[in-house]
Structure formats: C-alpha cells, structure tokens
Amino acid sequence: MSVTLLFRQWQLTWSRPIKIVFSIRWKLILSIILPLLLVTGIVMGLTLQRVYYSATDGLQQQYIREINLLARSIDNEFVSLARIAEDTAIFLRMQPTLDEAQLYDLLRQNAGRSPLIYGAAIAFEPFAYSREQRLFSPYIYDIDLKAIDIGAVAYDYTSGEWEWYAAVEATHMAQWTEPYFDTGAGNLAMTTYSAPIMRDGEFVGVTTVDLRLDNLSTKISAQLNNQKFMIMSAHGRFVSHYKPEIALNSTLQDLVADQSNPAFQSIADKIMGGSTSLDIIENLVLYDEVIAGNTWIFSTPIPSTDWYLATLVSEVDVTSPLREQIKIALLGLSLTIVLIFFLVWFISSRLTNPIKKLEAAVSDVARGKLDTHIENIRSLDELGRLSIGFNRMLKNLKKQINIQSQQEAAQKLLEREWQMARETQRSLLPTEFPPFPDHDEFELHAINQAAKHVAGDFFDFFFINPKTLIFIIADVSGKGMSAALVMAVTRTIVRDLAQSGKSPADILRETNERLRESQKGAAFVTIFLGSYNILTGKIQYANGGHMPPFLLAKNGSATTVGDATGTIVGMLEDQDYRNAELRLQPGETLLLYTDGFPEARTSSGEFYGAARIKSFLQRQANSSVSILCESAIREINTFQEGNLADDITILALRRVTGNSPNLFSDVLKPRS
C-alpha cells in the first residue's frame, strides 16, 4: 500500500465526528455529580464564609449578653446588700432603745444573709449610744460570726481616715466606699456600704455591710469559667482581677501606660466612660503575655457602685471549635458526594417505582387526605426508609394535631379560669366612681392594676357612720393567686373590725394577729388605714409598714406625710401600732400608693423614684382626682414600656369644702 493511500485512509477516519455513547447510569451520575461538585463548591465556600462571620458575630453578641447579665447580677447583689444596711438604719431609727445583745443579734442576722457579706457593723457618733461611752461600734464578721467593738479594740472610726464613716457623716447619704484594705477590724480587702442613722433630723451613726473582694473575684471567675476579667472602681483602681495579686495594687491607667498599642487608650476611655461596648485589639500584650491575633474586650458598667466590668477573650480560642466544625462539615460534604456517587451507581435502575408511590402519597396529603399510607414497602434502602418515615410522619402528624387541639382547649379553659379569678377579685374592690355622689365635701378615686392576672394590692373605702369614712390601701407580699387570696382575707378582716368602731391602730393590731395565725407567717401585708371626718377634714390613721403618702397642696407643692406607726402586718407576734392624725385643708389632696409606683424600673434598671412622683404631682395639681389616678397609672405603664414588674394601686382623697375656720396644718399627731 502506498504512502498516499495510507494518508487518505487516516484522513477519512479522523475527519468523522467522534460520538461517545454513555449509558443511562453514567448520564445520571454525570448529570448529578458534576453540577453537584460545581454548585456545592461555590455555595459551600460562600456559605461557610458567611456562617463563620455570622457565628463570630453571634458569639460576640452572646458574650455581650453574658457580661450584661453578669453585671446586672453583680449590681443586684450590691443593691440587695445595700438594702440590708438601709433597712437596718430605718429599723434603728424606729427602735432606738435596743441593748447591746439585741444589736449584736441584729448584726448576726445581717451577716448571714449573703455569702458575699464578710461583716456588718453599727457605728454610733461619740456618746450617741451611751453617755458613759464615747465610741461604740458592734461588728460581726467572718464565717464564724465573730464579734468585736471596733471603737474599743480596733481604731477610732470618727478620726476622718475611714471613708465608710466620714463620707456618710459629711453628706448624710448612703454610699459604697472606694475599695480598701481594712486594717484593724477585718484585715483584708473589702468595700463597704454605709447608710446613715437619722433620728429627728440628727445624724447619730451609720450601719454598714462589708463585701469581701476576694469572694467576689472567686464568684465572678467561676461564672466566667476562668476567663480573664477586671472590675475597676470609678477612679480606675482594680477592685477585682483574674490575677488576684493585681487587685487594689494597680489601676487601669497603669495598664494603659504599660501598653505600646495606642488603640488600648481609646478602649480604656470607653470602659471608664461607662458604656456597654465591644472592642477588638490585635496582638494585645497583657502583663508580659502576648495574646496572638485579635482579642475581644467586652465592657459594661455596674450602676449601683459606679464600677466597670471588662472581660478579655482571645478570638482564636473562642472560634477554634467553630473552625473545627467547618472542617468537619467539609469532610462530611466530601464523604457525602462520594456516597452519592456509589448510591446513584447501584440504585439508579430501582428508583422509578418507589418514587412514583411516594409522589402519589405526597399528592394525596397535599389534597388533605391524611389517611394515606404507602403499602408494600419491600426494601430498607433510602427510599424504603423514606416511605416508612413518611408513614410514621403522617401518624405523628395526626397525633400532634389532636394534642394541639387538646392543648388549645386546655389553654382556653385556663384563661377563662384566670379571667374569672380576676373578675372575682375586682368584685371585692369598689368599682363605681364617684363612689358617694351625695357627698360634695370630698372627692375620692382609686385604681388597681395587677402585674399578673390577679393582684396582691388592694384598696377599700366605706362609711361606718354618716360623717366617718374609712379608707385603706394595702400591699401583700408576692404576686399572683397566693397574694390575691391573702388580699381577700385581709380585706374581710379589716372591714369586719372597722364596722365594730375600733380605732385604726386597734384594727391593725388585731388584723396582724389574725393573719399571723391563719398564714403562719407565710406572707405579710403593708397597710395604711385612715378614718376621715368629712366635716372637719381630720384623718386618724395607722401605718403598718406602708410607704408614706404624698400631700398635694393647692399651689402644687407635694410633701410626704403619714410615716409608719408600726411594722408590717401578719408576720410578727404581739406588734404595737399607734394612731396618728393629720388634717386636710380645703383643696388639699392625699395620694396613697403601693411600691409599684416609686419602684417601677426601666429595662436598664432605673427607678421611677420619689422625685419623679413629686414632679408628676406638681403637673397634676389642678386635675381632678380621677384624672390624677388615671394619669399616674398611664405614667408608670409608659415608664416601664408596658412591662409591669409589680402591682400598682393608687388612691386619691381630696377635701373640697371645710366647715371649721380653725383648721390645723397637716402635721402628724401621734396618739398615746
């Protein structure tokens, strides 16, 4: 054969189009695997990137929430500890004749009320406790509740060197001290909350609660799982630190000075500015330790002490589990693609019939036929298990529909029962206003709003004779149904005793005994009970631990009157209650309220407070009592954004006319 002929044959062979024939199996494999690899690679890459950044952002938000919760928890601890000292100061003002043994017993109770309390003290002004004794300061401290007299065995706390006494003596204001090392009494690092003891406007001493700083550090470290943390005072001094030896011995300013990174200065300024923030700094050097990569610094204030909490977290350490999960996800994806290849290879020829059965069943379900069932499942492969799972899903779906229907019915029944309970409670309170249209000598209005379905607050008013009006406002400890039941019992007892003509003090005294016997001390009530002479404007009252009301004058000035004449009702045995008097001038309004008014709090922890109440009353000086009460409820709901933390009850009594030209000013007149 010639070379020319061979060339022509080769040319004819390779000039024809080459057709590669694939089987259906390979077509299925290639049509699935190749697009899957391409699309999955792109989507997975973008998705994992977004997941990483989203998860990182989620971790940052989680840490912010955790540090805010921790700061709020610490702040609540400080508020609770401060209240112990304040309540003790109030108690000592009301009980000035306690002997030494009783004072030490009181301090032992205070010291044991929180594991954070190291000690509790009462420090009197020179010769204020005894004319024969210049200094007297009983102190209970440590785990075994040891007792000493600071003034006798430790130091002269009136020398001006001790902030816990000198600052309160100078300002007559309760406050936390700057952290200090207490030499002579506790002999350890602590901070102290001091509250003034005032009697007849005179400063006679302080009550204190000491917080042991090393215990605070241990608690915070445990809550943060040994993360790096710092607590700074208002002056930047380290109060608590993940390195215990740093506490009280260094400041945030010292840490800034040790840094060569200028970005840390702005972060420190943010921390001391009191804002809640997240800052990221690269390659932070912390006490000769280099934290590689980014460090997250979270900071937030502790409002009650003007302290600041900061935590430091390495981004590499925090995101390490996330990166491991991403690696596992990529490995799982690769294995899944390989598995899909072999599954498609072996079972492609067996897909058609099971898929048709499943499609028919799904179509039936889509049309609402929940009794559909796939029959004759012969294999236990993916489609077989899918068919079994489909049958099980339909069975569970029908069961869940029945359960949901039953739950909805039960919920509706519960809501009806709560509504009936609330209506029953409302029926116990006066509902018609004005309540006494035939009497133009006075105006009266009241409103009760529950934090839950039913409330523990209540009010009541009724005539016991033509010229004497009894009015009551009370607050039962706790909320919900139990408080509502105590409220109903208390109302019945008070009404029964008032009709017998007893004085307010006698009514509270007997109510205390009846409640204590029936409730076994499980709940207590604060009560303000007044007997109002509609002709003279005179009010005889007894105040059982309730918040003193406000007296609103015609010119808009508002002052508190009616301090407690006895303690809470229903808790303590054989309590004595006194009667006191005040007189309303024509046009003056007496506003009674429960603690849900001044102690209303925003989500940030800010209280409504007495100052806002005075400002509110001044704005409402010319309003009717009904508008005054409704505006007060609306004001508190707006302040708390509709999320009531406690029941609120408001009662306003205004004298309209007077029959006597010699009306006394509204001063308290305790009755013997």
Image: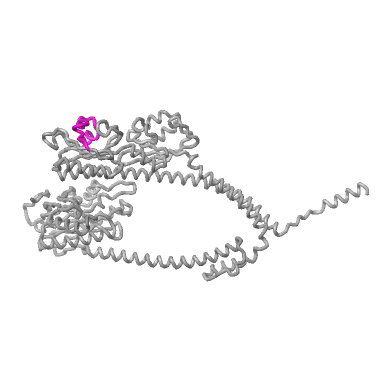
**Residue drawn where x is 11% and y is 34% of the image:** 132
Q: How many marks?
A: 0
Which segment did they paint magenta? Answer: 147-171
Residue 46 relative to residue 409: left or right: right
Task: Spot the residue most to the right.
Answer: 1
Quadrant position of residue 108: top left
- Nearer to the camera, 208 or 643: 208
- Nearer to the camera, 489 or 266: 489
> Measured from the top left, where is residue 519 in percent x and y?
22, 58
Up/down of 345 relative to 145, above or below: below
> Measured from the top left, where is residue 28 in percent x and y?
68, 58
Residue 239 relative to residue 501: left or right: right
Magenta stretch secondary structure, dominant: helix
- Nearer to the camera, 16 or 79: 79
> Measured from the top left, where is residue 16 in percent x and y?
81, 53
> Measured from the top left, where is residue 290 in percent x and y?
47, 32
Q: Can residue 588 be spotted in the picture?
A: no
Quadrant position of residue 418: bottom left
Residue 199 on the magenta segment: no
Q: Can residue 66 be spotted in the picture?
A: yes
Quadrant position of residue 265: top left
